[in-house]
Image (cartoon, grey):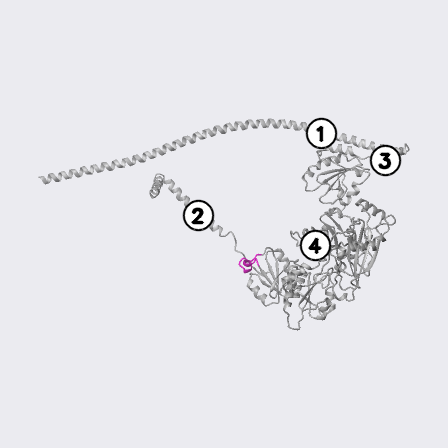
Amino acid sequence: MLRRVRQSLRQVLFLMARRPDLLCGAIVLGVLLVLAVKFTCSRAKNVVAAARPPVRFFSPDAPVVDLYLGQLDQVERLRSVAEVSFIFFYAPWCAHSMAARQEVQQVAKKLAKQVQFVAVNCWWSQGKCRRQNRFYHYPVIHLFYRRFGPIEYRGPFLAPYIESFVLRVITPLTYLPSRGHVEEFLSYHEPRVVGFFQFNSSPQPPGYITFLSSALQVLKRDFRGVVRFGVVTNKQVAGAISLTEDETVFLHRRFNSSLIFPRNDLNFTSEAICRWVFENRETVLQWLQPPGTKSRLLEEELTKGPALLLFVPHDPLGSQPSPALQQVSRKNQTNIIFEMTETHHSSWDKSFSFHSLCCQSVVLPQSSTSVCEVCLSLSWPSFATSPLHCLFPPSIQGGDIFQTYLRRCCLHQLPSPVSINSATAMGCSNFLDSYSPFSQYSACCRKVEPQLNESQAKEESEMQSVPPSLIPPFSVPQPEGDGITGLRCQTNRTLRFYVLDVALNWPLAVRLGASDDRGGDGSFAAIVNLKDEVHYVLQHTPAATLTESLEAFIRNFSAPYSLLQRHLEASRSDEHTQSPPRFLITELTTSSFLPSVMDLQKDVLLFYYTQWCGFCSVLNHIIIQLARLLQGNGTITVARVNVARNDLPWEFMVDHVPSILFFPRYRKHLSVKFPDNLPITLPNLLRFILQHSGSLHHVHKQSVETEGPGHSPFLGSEFLTLQREVQALHHARERLSQQLAQLWRDNRRLKFEARALETENAELQRERRSLEEQHREKSRQLSEAVRRLQELADASENLLNENTLLRVLLRALTDRTEAREQAEVERKETEQKRSHLAS
């Protein structure tokens, strides 16, 4: 191995000795390489500039401790000495953090004496907060109640909402000192939890801290704090809700029986109480708060079924719910929510009233036309101070005994359908429960006539000229109360109720059909049925309250054949501004579609398109040419509609774009679609229009034949109409002839140009072949020169080798000659010495 290295080194040195220029070139290249590496490394150090040191994010006069260096250890120290801590994690460059800074400062100035406000820069790379936390968005708000936390705030970064959340954390429990406070606390529609703890034996009962922690756990899951927690310390006050044992947690429910936390089955911990509350609570009105970013919150809720979206003004700092929610959820005045929220409940709960009504529908399987509704009326003397247990016997769910009683008590009272309208044919009966003198059953039965289809129902409603809001559903007589009943006997449809803050979600309301100006109290309601791809908008009249409008709205939606009109969304610009009339092509919108298309005096050719359809753009020039040809004809209208910006009735929709429909005059019900297998060209469109154009003859042919020749004016008007059509067709033929002549001339000119281009192309091809020959010749000559140069280089190399060998041989011969001469001189000297000695 060493021998090979030595040989290689000798060869390199030998070549360098032969060619000194190679050695100089290698030295120069090495120096340049070293300089380039040094220059590049020196530049790389200065590419990224050093970060500027952070500065205060909050103003100095704000009562906020600004830890702009990310000192997370200071946060722990400040949090340990405060009762409630508000931690605001921000990034100095974040626009959302800058916008929330003003809101946090407003809240801090109000609550600085109760809450410790701390702001931490979690973006500074050298700070401890950046190294220990990984936030995917900014800002982030965490609240701590003593040692409990963090409670993350996920609501809008507005001062009223932040302040409301902070106040909920400061006072997670509401003290209820009297029965009046308990009744007022339980009277709202929101879920309520009451804990009974006696502070007589000890200053702080053992379960009180757990109950307090469960209230904070609920706030951790729901930033709105919909579930409210109250605490009772007096045994007499706790008796108002039938609580006798100490350390009891009571979940109040309106529709079903209220519950008590089962301490024997579940561990008495804050997590268990929170989970139990969310599993068993009743949600009448569910708040929705879209985050404002990409989210599937609305989709997840709307896919569950039809939903009523109620946009109402909301004051987060108000001690009382908004008046609109009070009207909707007032249980003693209306039962709208009770009837439509969940139809599968078998009992309803109406606390704090002496008379209550629980109803359930019963369909008799043996009779396909008999429907009965059974109501249980309770009138207990102590009902005002005890929870309601509304229970139906199992016979209602399908027992033969109860159905036999219904046939005996009610069905025989129904008259025949021939003698009376079946919509009002009812038989009712009241009877007491044999087990309780305070409960009474009332049963009402009716016969249902065969249902009409949608068109027949509309015709019948138009003939009766009754507004949809005044059509009463089937209802049963009930004892005292103003509740609405009978909806379940018409339909088994489920409607979910969602509430949204109108100030935060007004753009969503506008997309659903709300007007741009917020008139009245700013409330808006719409029913969205994602499965049927329809939604209905509440037309709120000034004379009616929100409750009355919602009542009629829900009644009409719950009818077997809904009387509501599907809301059709149109372009906003077309609704507010009247565009000038288009002489060639009429642009239709949602509002002008039916009046224009269903005009009996005109044939309408309708072109369906969208702004994103490339094929529609290609066909625009053909539609424009067709409109120009038919411009002088007053009976044919060429129109188009953008189906992406204008909703149309289902019967006028198409399955793809572009599509062309023709609506002949006097025969709108015989509309024709342009065949898909034909190309959309000008001759095909003209042939399609002439084939299906309308005429009075198609409508009045039978009447003319039966009435005889007494209608010459009518025939004259028809003849004039046909004559005008023939004249219009002649004009169209002349225009087509002129266009064909122009096209022939253009075609001839294009042919001459094509011939000239072919000649030029042939000349260019010849030049290209000549250049290719020259290129091949030059390449051959160049390769020959390269070959000769290579031979010269090889000869030079051989000569150099021979020259070197000759020099070596010459040197050897010179050394040998010198050695011989030296030996000869030495021999002569020796002989002289010998001769001298001999003499």
In the rendered image, which residue does mark 3 sit on? 700
The x and y percentages for residue 130 are: 55, 58
Compared with 611, 386 (above or below) is below
**Foreground pick, 373 / 826:** 373
The x and y percentages for residue 781 are: 45, 29
Mark number for residue 35? 2
Main SS, magenta residues: loop
**Magenta range:** 122-134
Label 4: which secondary element: loop
In the rendered image, which residue does mark 4 sit on? 505
Label 2: which secondary element: helix
> Disc 1 vs disc 4: which is toward the camera?
4
> Disc 3 vs disc 1: which is toward the camera?
3
In the rendered image, which residue does mark 1 sit on? 742
Which class describes the residues within 10 Å of circle 4: few (<14), some (14-19), or many (20+)? Answer: some
Who comes first in sequence, dot 1 or dot 2? 2
Report the side of 54 relative to 731 (left or right).
Answer: left
The x and y percentages for residue 22 are: 38, 40
Compared with 702, 234 (above or below) is below
Who comes first in sequence, dot 2 or dot 4? 2
Number of numbered markers: 4
Q: CA distance from mark 3 to mark 2?
A: 101 Å
